[in-house]
Image: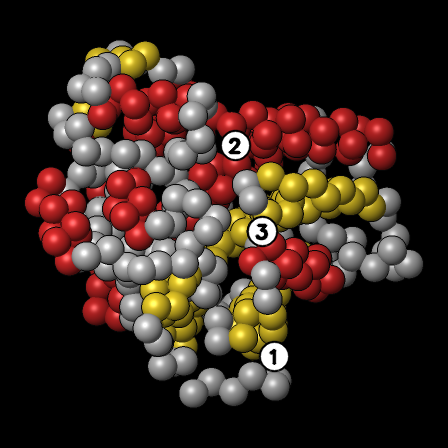
Amino acid sequence: MPHFFRLALLSLLTLWLSGCNPFAGKQEVVRQTFYVFGTAVHIEIVNTPKDKAMSAINAIEVDFNHFNREWHAWEKGGLLSKVNDAIAQHQSIVVPASVKAFIVKSQRLSKESDYLFDPGIGNLLKLWGFESEDWHGPPPSQQAINHWLKTRPSIADIRFDGNKLSSTNSEVKLDFGGNAKGLALDRAINTLKSEGIENAIVNIGGDMRIIGTKDGHAWKIGVQDPKAPSNVIGMVKLSGDESIVTSGSYERFFKWKGKTYSHILDPNTGYPAEHFLSVTVIDKDATTADSASTALMVAGPKRWQKVAKQMGITKAYLVDDKGHEIITDAMKPYLTLLPSHKTP
């Protein structure tokens, strides 16, 4: 199935599970879809006058498009591209306070993850060909990976003097594909809250943050089967203010000589993480959830509990490469597996 169509299908499945039936419900519902970050963005707002809801949605769309231009690691002209150029040229660059705050937060999250989540590995992603939408192999040579590992660039190498950014390692290339959607979700919800909107869901390609309720009931969100991504195997109920993010080896990958290579890379080995098929995380902060889902994918069965504790994650659903499932105690009240789904 083409990449774009699969993402759009997931989003539609998720909205269907949210109870978005135009002929049902007592509250006024406003829905809008637009495309950014290479995927479909769905926003649904309930119990809010249409003009007020559309004004907020339009503001989010403008912000997302600006955000995508500025934070895209591989397109020239944006802020992140300029930062990466400065780092490569051993130069410093002044950045806005909001940019510094996100980078500092990402540094903290990376440290808490033991740097299994690390936005400083952009050049490793480039080696594997995952900087573009046309990923097809072949995998990089062991020599190229060894060269990257020798320099081991990391977001930890970024320094600030006030708002002036520099790096102690010119091989650092920042790529926030691992948590930028989380930041976008947090920004969107902040916009909605600032407009006095209390009940809504923002969905970026299957990653979501919700506030309030849907018709007084929890929002219902579908969970993909990582072995058959077009299928839903469970349902999560969220209300209040929560985010849910999934990282999966099925999202971006290529096959080469019979072996599958995922875009989720282990900075310690230079190779794709292989132990988990998917990790779903719930947290009030979408940036944290996005970062943690990637980190736990890399951590694997032996290290995920330690990393989750360090990152403050208690609600997680993990599926390993043999199809075995792990559901944390804190996650169990939120997740219901469908009757047709059998746990191995």
Q: Please say if the residues under marks 1 and 2 sit with CB atoms less than 8 Å apart.
A: no
Mark 1 or 3, nearer chain start:
3
Residue 174 placement: quadrant: top left
- Which residue lies most toward the right here? 23
The foreground one among 199 and 20 is: 20
280 is higher (above) or lower (below) than 126: below
The residue at which mark 2 appears reads as 68
Q: Secondary structure at mark 1?
A: loop
Distance in Å between CA atoms under marks 1 and 2: 36 Å
Looking at the image, can residue 82 be seen? yes
Q: Residues within 10 Å of mark 2 (few under 14, many from 20)?
A: some
User: Residue flagged by tag 1: what amino acid is it?
Assistant: Leu
What label sits on residue 205 in the rendered view?
A: 3
User: Residue flagged by tag 2: what amino acid is it?
Assistant: Asn
Looking at the picture, how far across and down is residue 165, in whole percent?
Answer: 26, 18
Q: Which quarter shows the C terminus?
A: bottom left
Q: Is residue 285 left or right of residue 150?
A: right
Mark 1 or 2, nearer chain start:
2
283 is higher (above) or lower (below) than 81: below
Callout in the foreground (1, 2): 2
The residue at which mark 1 appears reads as 338
